[in-house]
């Protein structure tokens, strides 16, 4: 559909609002899910894309992740002591630095098989069991979510982004199969995961606290009621992103479909607030070159770690651990921007 000037202005302004208000208004930060839902509904209304199919999709899409969060929360609650003992043995046996390094590497590289959702749920549980202060724990979570987001893109089952890309490129001339993205992105992703693991290993040990005190400090409520509420918030969050993605899709189609690899790379920083699978669905076509594909995918997975709405692992961990938008930005945004610059230089030189 063709957007009018007014629609273009309103949708562009909405992106700015979504980026800024959660960082500057405390009430919005406290109620991020509801805020994004309102923004998503506004975007769909402005774009005139309301339909029964969209509403059904928005109601259906969050079900799998919500059930995963709910079931995993109840299971981890049941086996919390065993996981805690295992974590403590690892810290005592190989030290905190190597434990943090291995957590990031293992979750990052296995997320393409166990899915980004399961990797994030494991991360959220382990994070509160480590001898770290709040700031250090938030750093670990953000570093790990970057690694999970990068690793999960390597297969069609890790996260929706990989599914969309392989589906759209399954025919000629790419003939994308299961190992297609590993062949194209593998070394770049491996380097990013190892870098994040190295960053995590530099986090210093904090003052020891009882597990209950640490959980309370991170906003983690492991009662059945708390687990159910957290799952409901994740459901609303994913539903909101579905509306936001479809509502902003006409603007994306109008502005980014004919850009070069370099421009796409930087424009894809929108992935910090807009579902990366939606952007990939717009940008990836059978006519795309391998070079452009690598540029756009790396920009999507890196920028997705910058803000909480950018990736499912961010949403799960922030919800589970009570991490606020400002805290996430402080730990992740500057790092993500530096990574974007570094990858742009490397990709330009190599490709």
Image (cartoon, rainbow, N blue to C red):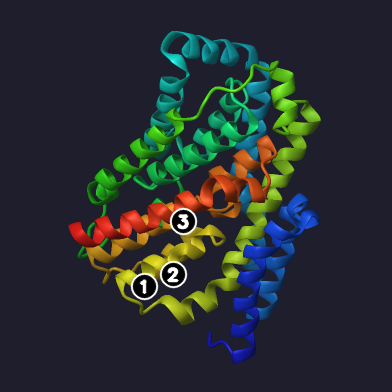
Percent of width and height locating residue 60: 63, 53
Closest to the observer: 35 or 21? 21
In this view, 17 is above or below 332: below
Callout 1–callout 2 Cβ contact below 8 Å: yes
The label shown at residue 267 is 2
Residue 168 shows up from this direction:
no
Q: Residue at x 70, y 67 (%)?
A: 39
The label shown at residue 263 is 1
Q: Secondary structure at mark 1?
A: helix
Q: CA distance from mark 2 to mark 3?
A: 10 Å
Residue 296 falls left or right of residue 176: right
State which tag comes first along the sequence, 2 or 3. 2
Quick one: label 3, few (<14), some, or many (20+) residues within 10 Å? many
Q: Residue at x 38, y 33 (%)?
A: 198
Q: Quadrant of the C terminus?
A: bottom left
Q: CA distance from mark 1 to mark 2?
A: 6 Å
Q: Residue at x 41, y 13 (%)?
A: 94
Q: Secondary structure at mark 2?
A: helix
Callout 2–callout 3 Cβ contact below 8 Å: no
In this view, 151 is above or below 165: above
Q: Which residue is mark 3?
A: 303
Q: CA distance from mark 3 to mark 1?
A: 14 Å
Closest to the observer: 181 or 202? 202
Residue 67 falls left or right of residue 230: left
């Amino acid at each position: 559909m063709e957007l009018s000037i007014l629609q273009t202005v309103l949708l562009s302004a909405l992106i700015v609002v979504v980026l800024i208000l959660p960082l500057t208004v405390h009430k919005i930060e406290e109620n991020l899910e509801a805020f994004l839902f309102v923004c998503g509904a506004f975007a769909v209304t402005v774009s005139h894309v309301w339909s029964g199919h969209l509403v059904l999709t928005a109601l259906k899409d969050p079900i799998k992740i919500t059930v995963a969060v709910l079931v995993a929360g109840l299971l981890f609650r049941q086996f919390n002591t065993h996981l805690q003992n295992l974590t403590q043995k690892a810290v005592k046996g190989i030290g905190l630095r190597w434990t943090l390094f291995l957590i990031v590497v293992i979750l990052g590289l296995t997320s393409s098989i166990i899915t980004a959702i399961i990797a994030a749920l494991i991360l959220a549980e382990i994070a509160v069991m480590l001898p770290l202060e709040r700031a250090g724990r938030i750093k670990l979570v953000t570093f790990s979510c970057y690694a999970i987001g990068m690793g999960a893109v390597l297969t069609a089952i890790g996260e929706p982004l990989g599914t969309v890309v392989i589906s759209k490129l399954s025919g000629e001339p790419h003939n994308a199969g299961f190992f297609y993205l590993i062949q194209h992105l593998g070394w770049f992703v491996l380097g990013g995961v190892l870098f994040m693991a190295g960053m995590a290993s530099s986090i210093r040990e904090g003052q020891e606290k009882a597990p209950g005190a640490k959980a309370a400090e991170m906003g983690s409520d492991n009662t059945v009621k708390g687990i159910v509420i957290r799952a409901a918030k994740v459901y609303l969050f994913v539903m909101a992103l579905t509306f936001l993605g479809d509502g902003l899709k006409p603007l994306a189609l109008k502005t980014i479909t004919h850009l070069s690899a370099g421009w796409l790379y930087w424009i894809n920083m929108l992935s910090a607030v807009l579902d990366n699978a939606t952007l990939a669905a717009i940008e990836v076509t059978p006519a795309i070159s391998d070079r452009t594909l690598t540029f756009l995918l790396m920009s999507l997975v890196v920028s997705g770690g910058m803000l909480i709405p950018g990736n499912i692992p961010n949403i799960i961990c922030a919800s589970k651990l009570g991490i606020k938008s400002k805290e996430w930005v402080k730990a992740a945004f500057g790092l993500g921007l530096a990574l974007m610059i570094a990858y742009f230089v490397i990709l330009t030189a190599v490709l």
